[in-house]
Amino acid sequence: MSGLMSLTGEPVNGPMRAGFAAADIATGMTAAFALSSALFQRTHTGRGQFVDVSMLESMLGFLSGQVAEYTVADYRHAQYGNRSVSMKPTADRFGCGGGHIVLAVLTDRQFVSLMTALGRADALADPRFADWFSRMEHAQALRAIIETAMTEGTPQSWEQRLTEADVPCATVHSIPEIVGHPQLGHREYLQDVDTPFGPVRLAGPAFRLAHGTGGLDRPIALPGEHTDEVLADLGYDPAMIAALRDAQVI
């Protein structure tokens, strides 16, 4: 409903879903901000309040740029595949040594660095690639040059080489690859949690605080696991909770 699918995928194949539950995650993040705002207001006003979070509006919040481009300038986005919203042909996904790499080459300086690192400095003198308008017009020829140059080597080796040349890029990792990436180990992002089924490794919080970063201190709750605890916090005594359970209310 939000329009995300209309922007995702290749034009020839039609709309495509994101590879994860985008609306669920976006709404959870929106709800976290909403609750933080409400708690902050309560701290200063002493008043609690009802928090209303919309899944549709949460998704549109993540698409705020595209929404504004339409409402302000009547610009209608289409499906651009893996190309950046900049529409520059060097900000796209490219085949590379049995895998894929994404380039984010958006400036003339970066373009010079890219061609030089690829061993194709000769292309800098080619009138087809003299400026961004020419490069966009001859995008397929430019893609062929880039992908041919990167045939040898792996995406990871090219990522290292291009990064050293100050060319923005990243390997397209699989989930198993990124889970084992040294960066996540350095940040201690993945956390081990004990569960009734044994220890499991899960994704932790994506932020750090100087004082009191949150973490995973318990597994995901089983259905009804905390019912008694929650009702007790609300003032129900054991007899009342037992009566509700006998009546199959809980």
Image (spheres, rainbow, N blue to C red):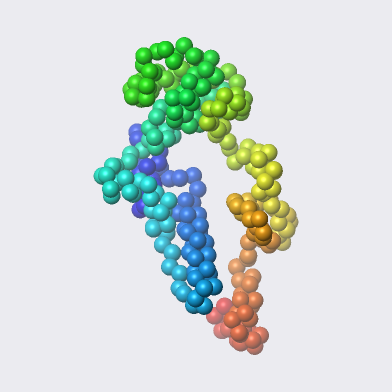
Name the outermost residue toward the front: 44
Q: Where is residue 221 shown, x and y percent of the image? A: 63, 65
Establish if 163 lies above or below 66: above
Residue 239 appears in the rendering? yes
Q: Is residue 18 above or below residue 224?
A: above
Q: Is residue 93 visible?
A: no
Identified at 52% across, 78% down, the residue is 46
| Residue sitting at the far left | 74
In this rendering, position of residue 41 left or right of residue 237: left
Q: Position of residue 207 (x, y in %)?
A: 60, 52
Residue 147, position as x, y percentages in the image:
49, 21
Task: Determine the image quadrant of residue 250.
Answer: bottom right
| Residue located at (49% from left, 51% from top) | 21
> 33 or 202: nearer the eye?
33
Residue 163 in the image: state x and y as whole percent.
58, 28
Q: Quadrant of residue 58?
A: bottom left
Return the residue nearer the eye: 36 or 108: 108
Pick whichever, 26 or 49, lies toward us. Answer: 49
Q: Residue at x 36, y 14 (%)?
A: 127
Q: Residue furthest bottom?
A: 239
Report the number of discs. 0
Q: Is residue 123 above or below residue 101?
A: above
The answer to whether 63 appears left or right of 102 in the picture is left
Residue in view at x 52 percent, y 31 percent: 168
